[in-house]
Amino acid sequence: MNTGCVIFDMDGLLIDSEPLWEQAGNAVLAGYGVTLTGEEYTSSVGLRTKEWIELWFEQYQIKAPVQEGIEAVETLATQYIVEKGSLMPGVAHTLSLLEEAGYTIGLASSSPMRLITAAVEQFKISQYFKVKSSAEHLEFGKPHPQVYINCAKELGFQPHHCLAFEDSFNGMIAAKAARMKCIVVPAALFHSQVRWQAADAQLKSLEEVTADLIKSMF
């Protein structure tokens, strides 16, 4: 039995949901007369909905209740993900490999818990995760490390005995700030960016995960 702990982000890593979050966010902002550039959206990937809405409401001086925007984005994103989402390549392979090797597996996401629950049940991967943690009600979300620290604690591990998988820059910073090893699987468009060198390993897809790679992180 392995004594290591592996914690996954969800959106964009396990589930191909980032384009759907983008669609939901853009649809809501369009209702306020705002259109984000691709660069603007990318800069905010990994933030909680609250911080995402606050950022763009302030940037574009949208005079509307923040909670109104949060609820609209999360409702639309949940609908899109359940109806149109799919698992990322290599998810089943990676989760099965870790389970068979005896690693403890957790999930630490910026998404609200109702969306996490709906997504992992929809794609039939809920059983792999001993703990599912959300940054929804924390004082700070990613890139703050609290959601990773909380997940490790609930799993019974010290953060420095954990490995995190992430796809976003904000998520990678959160994992490293928690003193975890981090493997990043960024979107293909961003693979060549130098900033990923802060991670302990970079993959093109979860299909590249091997038992030896995981073992090398502990």
Image (cartoon, grey):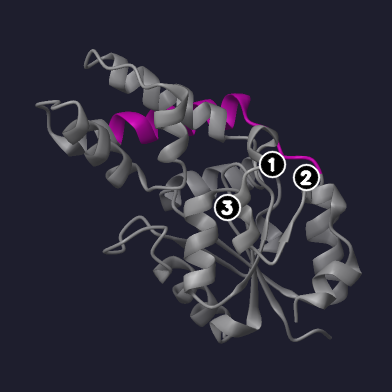
Q: Earlier in the sequence, mark 1 or mark 2?
A: 1
Residue sitting at 74 percent across and 86 percent down?
3
Identify the image quadrant of the C terminus.
bottom right
Residue sitting at 51 percent across and 56 percent down?
171
Dots 1, 2 in contact, CB < 8 A: yes
Q: Which residues are magenta?
A: 71-89
Residue 105: where, in percent of width, then height? 68, 69
Residue type at mark 2: give it.
Answer: Lys
Residue sitting at 64 percent across and 84 percent down?
161
Q: Which residue is mark 2?
A: 204
Q: How many circles with numbers are drawn on the protein?
A: 3
Please tell me whether residue 66 is drawn above or below residue 168 in the rendered image: above
Residue 216: where, in percent of width, then height? 82, 76
Along the line of sight, which residue is nearer the eye, 119 or 135?
135
Q: Quadrant of residue 6?
A: bottom right
Residue 31: where, in percent of width, then height? 26, 14
Residue 11: where, in percent of width, then height? 56, 44
Q: Quadrant of residue 39?
A: top left
